[in-house]
Amino acid sequence: MTEKRPAAGSKGVVVTNHPLASAAGAEMLLAGGNAVDAAIAALFTLTVVEPMMVGILGGGTAHLRLPDGRHVIVDGLSTAPGAARPDMYRTVSDTLPDYGETVDRENHFGPRAMAVPGALRAWCQTLERYGTFPLADVMEPAIRHASRGWRATPYLADCVSDNAGELATDHSLAGTFLPGGEPIRPGDRVVRADYAEALRLISRMGADALHDGPLGGALVRQMQRTGGLITMEDLRAAAPIEREPIRSPYRGYEIIGPPPPSSSGVHIAQMLNVLEGFDLRAIGFGTPDGVHLLAEVLKMAFADRAVATADPAFVTVPVARLISKDYAETRRAELRMDRAQDWQAGIGGTESANTTHVTVADGSGTIVSSTQTINSLFGARFTVAGTGMIANNYMYNFDPHPGQALSVAPGKRVFTSMSPMMVLKDGAPRFALGLPGGLKIFGSAMQAIINLLDHRMPLQEAVEAPRVWTQGHTLHLEPAISGETEAALAARGHRIERVKTVGGGMNAIAFDPDGSMTGAACWRADGTPVGIGGGLARAGVRFNPDAVTTEPKP
């Protein structure tokens, strides 16, 4: 039994992690825009109503399928400032679980935690190249909600309450989310007037308002006052990169996802290649053997990821080797069904769980799956004074130790687990999906693909099904995984930890051969699907007022 219900449509489907963002996307489709218009409108709205997750000072990865069948990956990830150095942080430990931590948590909170933002320029460029509406039109819903206000959901209120101490250190965050010194409550009206003005400026000037204009100037001056590293030269140099996706066959389907510096395309393909040697449907969902296999392939993928998957401009990533069937066969032969293993890399970090995702399709063949973030909840926990813009803390994604594949380097793009994935059958789209969740994203996306293709779950069930996760230490199990399975896994040597959630709120769209679409969002966030049916009047129909008659009086 699922907690939410899907939504179907023939003219388009919008699924985001907030109802107002889904409404903004639907508004664009209903006005005659395409999926790109809808996705960008939804993302700008999410920066207002889901501010703990996403912002114009963040970064992300988008996966577009265009009406002609082309797939484009738009890498709008953040980069390290030009003044950043591999040894810029004092590390706390050389071993897990504190490997990624630094003295005073400088890579997590405050100005030195902020990387050069990439999201805004990527959104504006994507809209200009592939959308149909002007920037001001797609930004209108976001500006409306920021200036007039919206009602806080319990999810937002909980996030504010959990981080109240840090939010209180920033004047703007405190004034918005801690009025009178107390966290906002569900149903409270939230207004972000200063951020509305920043959005209006962007709607007039475009991305240059930040990357070569007054918003960027305000950011740079604050960096200079507080010890941050970002300069105007960094902002001017920021640019999205369009990349070719990773493609991999799996049981007669084609799995398509982002290439490095994203982990998802490579390592989802790697894990599925290993699992293809097992009859997962016969093994069953949530069984000891089924979960054991998931845990072991996750550990394999993380072992390889730690040494290989980073910005390809700085690190040579052996993509062909990692996604090859031969490599999968070698790794599969090393797998033991009777016991858990500690896996080492077969070829010769840290990341936040707080992100958002948008999945949109229109009736003309454009599909957008986009994952965006400011990294941690409320990013680096400060705003650019007077603008309401919340800073990212993307520097936390780098390895603070020098000499590693994921170490800090000037201009280096952050690595990410973002997984805006699509699944094709005979060249036609069958599924598009993604989710937030940091390190847990690509493993969760892989499990959803297995749920759909191997276990043949309906879409809603597939996104809501219980998940597992490990990177080689403890095995996290969501509550719905049975106690019997937990006991059997412990007997094989897995160190078990029960958690409330693995990853965040997934949203997905399924495509039927008849042209209909179904959208689904899971219980782990405020996800809301909107399906659009109906359409315009039949061609040639005219209303003739002369044909109107009245009934004769009795």
Image (cartoon, rainbow, N blue to C red):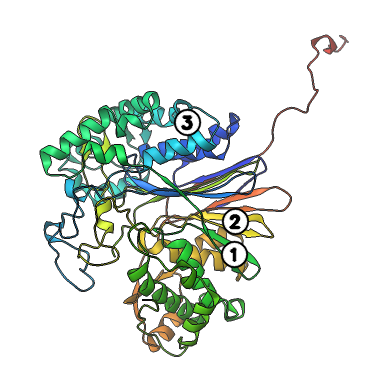
Other residues around mark 3 within 10 Å, as few (<14) / some (14–19) / many (≥20): many
Q: Quadrant of residue 206?
A: top left
- Residue for point 41% across, 36% down: 44
User: Is there a contact, CB below 8 Å, between mark 3 and mark 1?
Assistant: no
Other residues around mark 2 within 10 Å, as few (<14) / some (14–19) / many (≥20): many
Type of amino acid under label 2 = Phe
User: Is there a contact, CB below 8 Å, between mark 1 and mark 2?
Assistant: yes
Q: Nearer the viewer, residue 479 or 395?
A: 395
Q: Quadrant of residue 103?
A: bottom left
Name the spot of residue 312 as percent of width and height, x first. Answer: 38, 59
Q: Quadrant of residue 469?
A: bottom left
Other residues around mark 1 within 10 Å, as few (<14) / some (14–19) / many (≥20): some
SS for dot 3: helix
Q: Which residue in the protein does label 1 denote?
A: 452
Whether residue 171 can be seen here: no
Disc 1 and disc 2: Cα gap in Å?
9 Å
Q: Is residue 136 left or right of residue 217?
A: right
Q: Which residue in the protein does label 2 denote?
A: 431
SS for dot 1: helix
Name the spot of residue 395 as percent of width and height, x first. Answer: 25, 53
Q: Is residue 45 left or right of residue 197?
A: right
Q: Nearer the viewer, residue 184 or 398?
A: 398
Look at the image and tell me in which quarter the N terminus lies.
Answer: bottom right
Q: Which residue in the protein does label 3 denote?
A: 138
N-term-proximal mark, 1 vs 2: 2
Disc 3 and disc 1: Cα gap in Å?
33 Å
Q: Nearer the viewer, residue 435 or 190?
A: 435
N-term-proximal mark, 3 vs 2: 3
Type of amino acid under label 1 = Leu
